[in-house]
Image (spheres, rainbow, N blue to C red):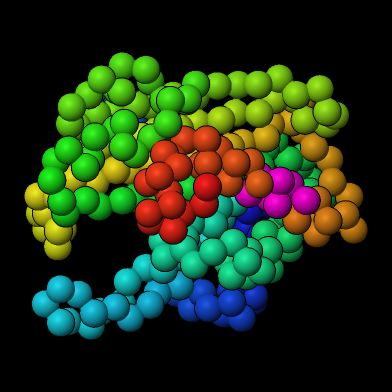
Amino acid sequence: MVAKRVVRDIEGRASDVGFFDKQPLQQIHFQFESQNADIRQTPINGMLFQHNSLVRDANGVVAPQLAKQFVVQPEQTVMQIQRYRGWDVEWPDAEKLFVPALRIASEVVPVAAFRLEYLNRFVFDGPVEEGNVNHLLQRSDFIAPHVFEAQDLFHSHTGRFDEISLSPMKRRLTQVNADLQILSPPHPTAGNRTLSLMMAVEWQFGVPGLEVPPPEVEEVVSKYFSCLHDDIHALFKKLVDSKFASENNLPQ
């Protein structure tokens, strides 16, 4: 019921921040028994509000491409941005949807966690040695040690919980996935190497969660997401090689 109330509210706000398309999240339920199999469609499990942009592809064809979407589900509310333009540009519109959504939900349930996740992708069109991990990343607790011996492609997926004594937070989860791979068709630069660097910081609250009075929702949302952004920014600078960051105009 809470998710339905949030969806109805967001339907009246989404177009104001460029989300003109929406799609229901539908599930199919399979139930297998000894005599027969029952297949039925379950009730709508949430809603996607989408913002599309017109983009010209490698063949010169102009077509709509997903720029960002706001996802409402019973267990979570998520903003996914495909064409990120910077925190100062993206956050004001995100806040206009997060605040009313949380204001409705907080009347019924506490907040379990706030999470911010970034996926950075770097494409290399030069010699193989330029993609060596030692030229891209710094040694860190969040990068597996053995990948610094890699001569070419690698994977490193790590994470850590840190206990936090600052009430009402219980713990902080930090995750870093670093992957050096070869792009495959139909990507326009297929054959080149790409570094995919996913960073996530999640602040989790103790049971039963963070109870937020409706009048304080806007302040709480702004506070926690701003702090998460600062955490991600600091993490990026600890992971990416300073020379590589300087040469590519990245935070350092």
The correct choice, above or below, for 56 with respect to 123 in the image is below
What's the magenta bit mostly, secondary-structure-wise?
helix
> For this rendering, which residue is in front, 90 or 38?
90
Residue 54 in view: yes
Residue ID at (17%, 38%): 129
Q: Quadrant of residue 93?
A: bottom right
Residue ID at (38%, 77%): 53
Residue ID at (29%, 43%): 195
Q: Quadrant of residue 197?
A: top left
> For this rendering, which residue is in front, 240 or 203?
240
Question: Is residue 164 found inside the magenta-colored segment of the image?
Answer: no
In screen coordinates, is 1 left or right of 144? right
Report x, y in % for residue 252: 52, 47
The correct choice, above or below, for 42 with respect to 222 in the image is above
Residue ID at (48%, 78%): 20
Question: Is residue 226 found inside the magenta-colored segment of the image?
Answer: yes
Residue furthest toward the top?
146
In screen coordinates, is 8 left or right of 50? right
The correct choice, above or below, for 42 with respect to 248 in the image is above
Q: Which residues are magenta?
A: 223-229
